[in-house]
């Protein structure tokens, strides 16, 4: 069974924009130990660990989850001991070497701890609230979307938005964005200190920064589209799994298990190919950054050799130390900035669903009279009906009247408009012309007032590819 990537991409209506992937976790850095006080409850890894230790208990017919408080106490306690150890070490060394209280370095350490905590708390609060707002807006837009939207969009495409894309916005994007802001501020601080001591270090730093920005722009031109492709090829996996579960008994009855397994493997392989392509592009970017950083350190080293008559040993050591520090920070900062922009692909996909066309209002100022409808007189006056603005009409100027208590049978070939007549009554799409029920124009009523007064036994059909 063959699947077309181009067809999937076009079917998902990809648009040009800016987006993102799973972030690469920052390697441990001793220079960032004190200021890196991150809230662990927002990290996906801790959430996964917590979910494995949670226990569900049944209470009054509902499931309630017991949080493992020991896990949170351990994480927060470990971070507290880690930060307090730095404060204790600075005080102990000052008292041991200088034999007097050193309140200034101790105050700086305490201020760093406090600033790191407040910074991460504010950033995570803002980002998580933004993610919640995006989720609620998309959820409300889906609830108000017309039925036509669910006819042309498979369930996997909707599930993909609410699972993977919302997961990226909730967990990975805040963490990566906060890490990028932190590294960016550290780079500015290191450059300022290094330039104040050794102005010559700015000579290789400025060209290196320009090369990093050029390489980042070149990389994002490809990685954004690859990320969109990876997100799009994930939707058929959800759709196929959902339809297979719904028709599981029919599949087993006809012995089609192997065919559906092969189809699922084909969808999964297609997504894995796109995801592997995204990983390889990220590795390509990382290798180029490593090479540029190595060239930067080499140039700095030879520059110190050329300026050995003007620099003392301490300045040379400081220059090389800052060069190595900037090498790692530049590389990680550029990678994290690219990760943030790639992850914005999930934000773009969520924003696309927040702007869906909505149905008519549920309630209007004009309410039906009490006891409506009391007779059941239905009149179609020049009704034309189409399921969308760009599709041809399926009903053309319909004129009909159904008397109260009549039993009416509507016959016709497939596609003649039998179901469309019911769709026009329920206003699944807005018809042209007027439909009267006991003298009340249905288009003037709210959808709740109209649909609550009618009943239908739907025709449910299932189809598997």
Image (cartoon, grey):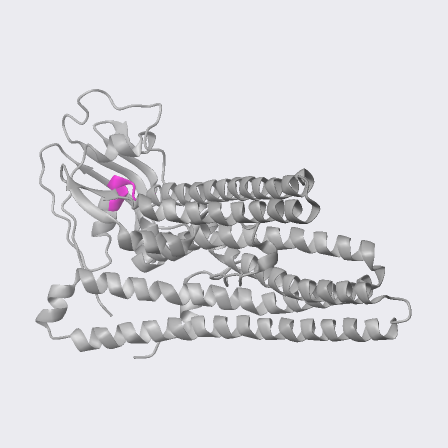
Q: Is residue 20 positioned above or below 402 on the image? A: below
Q: Residue at x 29, y 34 (%)?
A: 447
Say which residue appears at 53% left-offset and 48% top-offset.
Answer: 85
Residue in front for this viewpoint, 439 or 368 = 368
Going by the image, does 273 lie left or right of 451?
right
Asked if residue 93 can be seen in this view, the reply is yes
Q: Is residue 125 left or right of residue 400?
A: right
Q: Position of residue 254 (x, y in %)?
A: 10, 73
Q: How many marks?
A: 0
Which residue is outermost to the bottom?
A: 1
State the extent of the magenta-drawn residues as a range.
423-429
The stretch drawn in magenta includes residue 425:
yes
Q: Can see residue 390? A: no
> Quadrant location of residue 5?
bottom left
Name the residue nearer the viewer: 205 or 156: 205
Q: Is residue 66 above or below residue 307?
A: above
Query: Observer-nearest residue: 330 or 132?
Result: 330
The answer to whether residue 347 is magenta is no
Which residue appears at 12% of the width and 32% of the height? Answer: 404
Image quarter of the C terminus = bottom left
Q: Residue at x 91, y 71 (%)?
A: 309
Give the left or right position of residue 226, taking residue 357 as reference: right
Quadrant containing the N terminus in the rendered view = bottom left
Q: Looking at this view, name the residue that lies furthest to the top.
A: 370
């Amino acid at each position: 069974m063959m699947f077309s990537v181009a067809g999937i991409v076009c079917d998902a209506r990809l648009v040009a924009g800016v987006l993102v992937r799973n972030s690469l976790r920052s390697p441990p850095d001793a220079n960032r130990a004190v200021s890196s006080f991150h809230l662990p409850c927002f990290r996906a890894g801790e959430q996964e660990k917590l979910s494995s230790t949670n226990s569900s208990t049944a209470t009054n017919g509902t499931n309630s989850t017991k949080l493992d408080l020991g896990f949170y106490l351990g994480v927060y306690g470990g971070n507290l001991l880690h930060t307090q150890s730095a404060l204790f070490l600075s005080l102990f060394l000052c008292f041991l070497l200088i034999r007097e209280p050193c309140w200034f370095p101790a105050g700086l350490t305490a201020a760093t701890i406090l600033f790191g905590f407040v910074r991460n708390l504010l950033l995570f609060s803002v980002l998580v609230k933004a993610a919640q707002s995006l989720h609620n807006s998309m959820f409300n837009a889906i609830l108000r979307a017309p039925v036509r939207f669910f006819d042309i969009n498979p369930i996997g495409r909707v599930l993909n938005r609410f699972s993977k894309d919302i997961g990226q916005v909730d967990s990975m994007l805040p963490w990566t964005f906060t890490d990028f802001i932190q590294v960016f501020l550290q780079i500015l601080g290191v450059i300022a200190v290094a330039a104040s001591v050794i102005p010559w270090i700015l000579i290789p730093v400025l060209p290196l920064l320009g090369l990093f920005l050029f390489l980042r722009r070149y990389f994002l031109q490809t990685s954004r589209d690859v990320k969109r492709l990876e997100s799009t090829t994930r939707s058929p996996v959800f759709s196929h799994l959902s339809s297979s579960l719904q028709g599981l008994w029919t599949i087993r009855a006809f012995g089609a298990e192997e065919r559906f397994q092969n189809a699922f493997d084909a969808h999964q392989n297609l997504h894995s190919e796109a995801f592997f392509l995204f990983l390889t592009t990220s590795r390509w970017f990382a290798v180029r950054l490593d090479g540029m950083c190595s060239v930067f350190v080499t140039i700095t080293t030879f520059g110190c050799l050329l300026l050995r008559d003007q620099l003392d040993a301490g300045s040379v050591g400081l220059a090389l130390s800052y060069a190595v520090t900037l090498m790692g920070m530049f590389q990680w900062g550029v990678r994290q900035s690219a990760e943030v922009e790639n992850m914005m692909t999930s934000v773009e996909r969520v924003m696309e669903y927040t702007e869906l066309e909505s149905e008519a209002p549920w309630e209007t100022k004009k309410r039906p009279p009490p006891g409506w409808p009391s007779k059941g007189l239905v009149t179609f006056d020049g009704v034309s009906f189409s399921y969308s603005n760009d599709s041809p009409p399926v009903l053309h100027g319909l004129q009909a009247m159904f008397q109260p208590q009549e039993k009416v049978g509507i016959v016709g070939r497939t596609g003649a408009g039998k179901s469309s007549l019911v769709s026009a009554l329920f206003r699944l799409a807005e018809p042209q012309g007027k439909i009267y029920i006991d003298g009340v124009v249905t288009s003037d009523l709210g959808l709740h007032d109209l649909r609550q007064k009618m009943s239908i036994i739907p025709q449910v059909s299932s189809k598997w590819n």
